Image: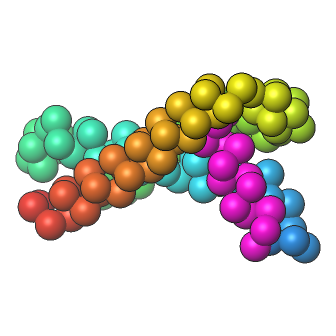
Amino acid sequence: MSILYYWLYKILSKTRREEDPGFATTIVLGFMLYWNIITILKECFPIDYFSVSKAYAIFFGIAIAPVIFLPLYFFLYKRRFIIIERITEFTSKRYMIGKFFSYLYFIISVVTTFYFLLNH
C-alpha cells in the first residue's frame, strides 16, 4: 500500500502544487479501498440478502468510513516523508516489482468496478 501511496503522491505532486498532495493521495486511496470493499460485498451477497432501510445503510457507510480513513491517515499520511525516502532507496528490481503490483491493484480495481456496474 505504501508503494501505491508513493506513486499516487508523485502524480498528485505534479498536478496539485498549491495543495497538499499527501492528503489528497490519502483521500484517493481511502475512497479506492472503500469502493473495493463495497464491490466485494456486492459480489458476495445478493442485493436482497440484507433487508435494511436506506437510512441505516447510509449511516453504516458513514460509520465505517473512519475505520478505513484513520489507519490510512496515521500509517501513510503521517509517515509520508519516511515512505518517500524509503521507496527512493529501493533497488531497481524491487522498485519495478512494487510499481507493477501497484498498477495491477489499480487496474484490477477499475476492471472489477466496471464489471460490477455493467452486470448488475
User: Please, is residue 74 above or below residue 8 in the view?
Assistant: above
Q: Is residue 117 visible?
A: yes
Q: Is residue 13 magenta?
A: yes
Q: Is residue 78 magenta?
A: no
Report whether 4 appears left or right of 89: left
Outermost residue toward the front in this view: 92
Magenta-highlighted residues:
1-15
Image quadrant for the N terminus?
top right
Q: Position of residue 17 (x, y in %)?
A: 87, 71
Q: Residue at x 37, y 40 (%)?
A: 37
Q: Residue at x 43, y 42 (%)?
A: 105
Q: Position of residue 40 (x, y in %)?
A: 27, 40
* Main secondary structure found in the magenta portion: helix
Report whether 117 appears left or right of 119: right
Q: Residue at x 80, y 36 (%)?
A: 88
Report whether 2 appears left or right of 37: right
User: Please, is residue 74 above or below residue 34 in the view?
Assistant: above
User: Please, is residue 13 above or below residue 77 in the view?
Assistant: below
Quarter of the image holding residue 67? top right
Quarter of the image holding residue 82? top right
Quarter of the image holding residue 36? top left
Q: Position of residue 32 (x, y in %)?
A: 49, 50
Q: Residue at x 74, y 27 (%)?
A: 90
Report whether 39 appears left or right of 115: right
Q: What colour scheme was applied to this rendering of the protein?
A: rainbow
Image quadrant for the C terminus?
bottom left
Q: Is residue 24 visible?
A: no
Q: Nearer the viewer, residue 109 or 45?
A: 109
User: Please, is residue 115 above or below residue 41 in the view?
Assistant: below
Q: Position of residue 55 (x, y in %)?
A: 37, 56
